[in-house]
Amino acid sequence: MAKTGKSSLAKGKDPSSMAETGDSSSSLTGEVRELKKELERVVRMILEEEDDDDNRIDTISESIRILSRLREMKLNQPAVIGMDDDKGKAVLPPKQDGDSPMSSPSLVMGNPFVSVSNQALKWMKSNEAKLKSQEMMDASRVSANMHLERLCGSFSDKVRAARELSKLTKSQPAYRAIFAELPDSITRLLGPLLSEDYYDPELEQDLSYRVSKLKMKQDLMEIVLDISTDDNNKQHMAEHPSVIPLLDRTLYTGTMETTRTAAMTLVSLLSLESNKFIIGKSTIPAALLRFVDIEDAAAAILSLCTVHENIAKFNKLGAIKVMSQKVDEGILVDQLLAILAVLSSRQDVFFEFEDVDAFRRLVEHRRNISSQRAENTSSASAAIRCFTRR
């Protein structure tokens, strides 16, 4: 019986033993965390050092020592780099199953004075670009997220965050690409543009406050333009419920600068074919037609007109009459004649009397045009040929 009791006690778990196990596990987790931080610091040093730096070997040795400790903790078994007595070369532990091309070499430093393996040096060199790229993306992600959070803060926070983020997205492509990954990044970015919860009637009398608010909006619109140039953001932005309405509102109510920025953003988004259908179904075509004398607005219209449904919509909005009048005034003649040629190419377009009169004026424009304006003549001729086939 005594033996049985002893056996039962052996199988049970002593509370003090469980506490020790918990403490040990927590200690290991903390050590792993610290080792990873140290490894990140050492790898950064390796990437920044010159190839002929005398300290480079020592730094790589330190990285191998950290990797080896992490491996020991993961596998719970030491594996030491030894020396092949016959060949005088370092002996590496076998490669583990599932090692990826970006995985570090399976090295464990047992003796700090052992020569650094050529394999470790080769790995560091071959993955240097990837490590640098990943490091930049990680830093961009943290920085962009910080600025987006500040856009939800006080008015002064919003102004500073918009200014800094605008500089970053303008100069560094990594900051544009990161918006496709950050949760609610577009929503947070547009927040100050869609809701003026920071509005203060008393401060509105202050000129510096009004100037800061205007500059903040310009910075935010420029960020929208910058991130729209990244292919990973184009579809997401066009499908976002707030982006197209914001661009539409900016075309009507923005300053000359923000209106141009909105038009440029549309040109950028329209480089994705599927976006031409999304934007064509919105109220954007009417807004663009109103500002057709802006070069980027005309470019956006021409891009939309590669879709037949959009051509019909512009014709219904009276685009032929509007653009013919602009041509008469000598405004964006090249671009508008090209659009007129496209608009008149549909066989099912019905021309009213005003359109006929517009094309008569177009003929006169062709007769009076200088011989040096060959491109204009070609565009005008194309539009007239399409019209005269009716």
Image (spheres, rainbow, N blue to C red):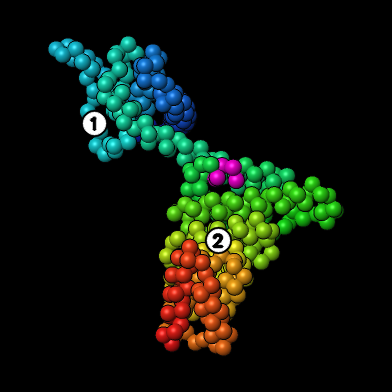
Identify the disc placed on residue 296.
2
- In this rendering, is residue 107 above or below 261? above
Furthest residue in direction left, as rendered: 86
Instruction: Give the x, y percent position of residue 8.
Output: 35, 34
Identify the disc placed on residue 95.
1
In this view, the residue in front, 331 or 22, is 331
Which amino acid type is shown beneath numbered disc 2?
Asp
Residue shown at 55%/45% (left/top)?
Answer: 170
In this view, the residue in front, 273 or 62, is 273
Look at discs 1 and 2 and give the one toward the viewer. 2
| Magenta extent | 166-170
* The C terminus: image quadrant: bottom left
Separation of marks 1 and 2 at Cα, in angstroms: 57 Å
Which amino acid type is shown beneath numbered disc 1?
Lys
Quadrant hosting residue 66: top left
Is 214 on the left-hand or right-hand side of 108? Answer: right
Residue shown at 59%/73% (left/top)?
Answer: 328
Q: Secondary structure under badge 2?
A: helix
Residue shown at 48%/43% (left/top)?
Answer: 174
Majority secondary structure of magenta residues: helix
* The N terminus: image quadrant: top left
- Are there few (<14), some (14-19), or many (20+) residues within 10 Å of tag 2? many
Let me know if residue 233 is in the magenta part. no
- In this rendering, is residue 128 above or below 212? above
Identify the disc placed on residue 81.
none
Residue 243 in sight here: no
